[in-house]
Image: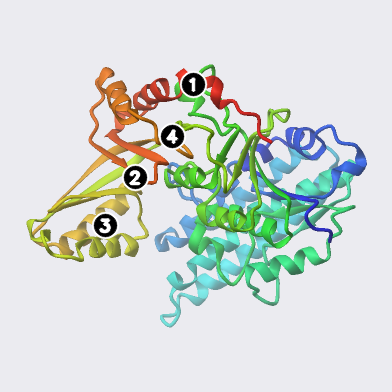
Amino acid sequence: MTSEQHTVEKIGGTSMSNYEAVRDNIILGGREQDDLYQRIFVVSAYGGVTDELLEHKKTGEPGVYALFADAESDWAWGDDLTKLIQFLTDINGELFPDPMLKQQADQFITDRIEGVRGCLIDLQRLCSYGQFQLEEHLLTVREMLAGIGEAHSAFNTALKLQQEGINARFVDLTGWRDNELLPLDEKLKQAFDAVDLSRELPIVTGYAQCKEGLMRTFDRGYSEMTFSRVAVITNAREAIIHKEYHLSSADPNIVGADKVVPLGRTNYDVADQLANLGMEAIHPRAGKGMRQNEIPLRVMNTFEPEHTGTLITGDYVSEKPQVEIIAGNKGVFAIEVFDQDMQGEPGSDRRILEVLGRFKVRFVSKDTNANTITHYVDSTLKHVKRVVRALKDEFPNAEISTRKVAIVSAIGSDIKVSGILSRSVKALADEDISVLALHQCMRQVDIQFVVDEDAYEKTIVALHGALIEPHNHEYAIVAA
């Protein structure tokens, strides 16, 4: 396999659901036949499929996994699995008008799902005995179910491209019926040793079964880690993520499409800040490998292929200090622990972090003073209530309170701008927005404003208007 000539490209779920756009704007993109190769595509499941397999990402509505994990659901998960077959074969029907190809696609995914059904029935029967606990196997079940979505979309895409005269190759990393469990890097080396990038177009599952267990660390962000490690292991010259939108100065649905501008350049530090807010350009752990190996990352809009997108590199710093993006998270809970015994007593923060870690609750930011520690967590109300109960046990004399808030950040590769804080606070005051807390680090890459949840969109509009719109022409830098 020839290295340093090829790109590794990830296609998101919303984009995958529009095959014509993927084919015309990404795969073909005006290329001649000989120019179609020297590219590896890592694909997500079709939009909505992983929600059906696991649980709905935003509403929490249970999918097959959540129903199976609930011991009281009995056979509800099996009925859901049957509905899933219909859902996925309906997708096949839209993609393959040729009945022979549809039959081939239907057979592939039905075999997978029925294989999983048999496995889950056996596991449920096994765990009816006291010596075997279902909880010990749930992560494996979650991974097995998640892999169905990417296997479905990758197989279909390869089959469809082959029908259209492109030498696509389905690369299945899901571990289906594999006899050995390999470390991720070794699994990838083994998979791509057999691929000739000069004449084959690999369509790769975004889920990869491996010893490390990707979902243990990344949960539903696993496809980004697969994408990142494929780029590193194959020594790609560039990594590209295709999304349904540009990486822009703010959400156009909030600020207005006429006021935002796509970012031309930024760095991995900014990408990390976005990930911290839950607005991932790339997962920080996934970005780490590419940053260390000096592989540039480009984020492109599937539906505007003529635009060069946003180029993310490790060494980029804006020519002059400026805010590049206003982003935020409105699904945040502030958990405040007030205890006068904290004064002069080290270790209180560590004890709080141990509780958060126990319930796998991620915090976005925190602030402290002499007797109060507040963590701003990105979690559900159910998990927050569990954390509060545990904290009351840990700090019996403390006053513990929670509040739903929003965090909005002004982010840039270098925001060391004179007067930026006063301008920001004035812009919010002019809109009668109260700042509940404010955080600015010495590293000068972001300022976080904690506001009431219902002031979230108003805050983004105000900060974008004050910090970015006066300089819009400076942001539309054409990526190299």
Q: Which of marks 1 and 3 is in front?
A: 1
Q: Is residue 332 left or right of residue 143?
A: left
Of the 4 image quadrants, the one containing the C terminus is top right
Q: Residue 441 carries which label?
A: 2
- Of labels 2 and 3, earlier in sequence is 3
Disc 4: which residue: 327
Label 1, on which residue?
471
**Residue at screen point 75% across, 69% down:** 190
Q: Is mark 2 on a helix, strand or loop?
A: loop
Which residue occupies the foreground of this view, 324 or 362? Answer: 324
Q: Name the residue under label 3.
A: 386
Q: Identify which residue is drawn at 17% across, 50% down.
A: 369
Label at residue 408 = none
Pointer 2 with pointer 3, Cβ within 8 A: no
- For label 3, the SS is helix
**How far separated are the C-alphas under marks 1 and 3?**
45 Å
Distance from disc 3 to disc 4, alpha carbons, whole Å, reads 29 Å
Q: In which quarter of the image is residue 14?
A: top right
Q: Where is residue 300 in the image (x, y as percent from the top left)?
A: 65, 36
